[in-house]
Image (cartoon, rainbow, N blue to C red):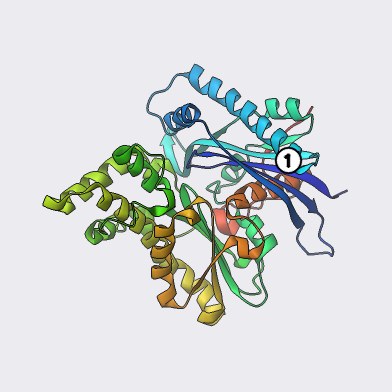
Amino acid sequence: MVKSMVVAGVMSGTSADGVDVAICKISPALMAGGTPRIKLLGHLGLAYSKTLRTAVLGAMDADAISVAELARLNWRLGELYADAVVSAQEKFGVTVNLVGCHGQTIYHQGSPEKYLGKALRATWQIGEASVIAERLRVPVVSDFRPGDLAAGGQGAPLVPMLDYCMFRSAKVSRVLLNFGGIGNLTAIPAEAGVDGLMAFDTGPGNMVIDACMKRLYEREFDRGGAVGRTGRVLQNVVQEVLKEKYFSALPPKSCGREQFGEVFVSRFIATCRKAGGVEDRNEDVITTATALTAASVGQAYRKFVWGHVGQAAPLSRVEFVVAGGGTKNVSLMRMLRAELEPMGVKVRFMEELGVPAQAKEAVAFALLAWLSWFHLPGNIPAATGAKRAAVLGKVTTV
């Protein structure tokens, strides 16, 4: 029997900057054919230590790393996630019945590639669920993405299930963008059913900006977009990057550090240096990386999303709702508005819909855990390209 539960969703994204815990009360739909009801009880964000972030970034899409290092990192993250849920329970005075833990992605390949004579997809999220289950003494649902890959999907994006349950509207079309390490969006036309949803990764979110800041300024990120505000946009570089295959590929599609990690960043910085000429300046690289992120979203909207939502509603009835760490980058948000508002699209923050921007993905994995616990599908084939709706995740019990 499907029933209400208090669920902790635990999320650490491709930015590898920390962990978010969202404690939610999730209840069955009030009527047949409805969607689950989700109430956020509290959100706690905890930063990774500098040494842990270095270890995580070193493991992502690594050319060479020892098996021992990966095993130890898997268990260390399990302890960290358990600590985070304990802290959230204490802060908000609640006891959870279930935990949904996304884990830390260290490799994601959503499209088939040949390996040992077989074309296959692959994904790997670490953070030992047994540690969390033992510490909390409640069941844990983890490792959500493989179920979708096995069903022929890309394993991403999975947040669209939350977007559909919480944010669809009969009156306005909504595009919901999350600016994490990667930018991912969900487009829901007004009055659309679940099959009318479109979702995909737009390209880099904070990932390239952060990596350039680390290389050029030895800082983890561009706080408030302060550096990005001071440089020039090297438009030729932005336009050249946007010609790359990923940006023109049709949805559904997903990406990660495999496309926009260290190799891409080295090439991007070198291209900016060449374009900058005698006036070569570090701030121009950061400003151009910021502009690339905004322009990739604008191009994705024009090429793929407008035809999906715009034909279903007047321009004034399209809302573009932004969440994630990128919302704190004032320069990025200014550039995003400059891309979208000339098309008549209203840009809003996720907080205006009642969910803190940084909490959204953690809420999504609380919902996915609840669905999995009751043997209900969590992916949306229209978003991931899967052949069927699938129950996601692996359950660890105590």
Q: Nearer the viewer, residue 64 or 101?
A: 101
Q: Quadrant of residue 375?
A: top right
Q: What is the three-letter code of the residue carrying label 1?
A: Lys
Residue 390 position, x and y percent, is: 67, 48
Q: Nearer the viewer, residue 242 or 253?
A: 242
Total labels drawn? 1
Residue ranking furthest to the bottom: 314
* Residue topped by disc 1: 91
Q: Is residue 364 left or right of residue 372?
A: left
Residue 250 position, x and y percent, is: 43, 60
* Figure quadrant of the C terminus: top right
Residue 61 drawn above or below residue 112? above
Residue 366 drawn above or below residue 133? below
Which residue is at 25% across, 45% downward? 269
Which residue is at 44% across, 74% downward? 341
Residue 301 drawn above or below residue 366? below
Q: Is residue 343 left or right of residue 193?
A: left
Residue 288 position, x and y percent, is: 30, 55
Residue ranking furthest to the right: 1
Q: Nearer the viewer, residue 184 or 194?
A: 184
Q: Nearer the viewer, residue 193 or 62?
A: 62
Which residue is at 21% across, 44% downward? 270
Look at the image and tell me whether residue 252 can be seen: no
Which residue is at 48% across, 54% downward? 328
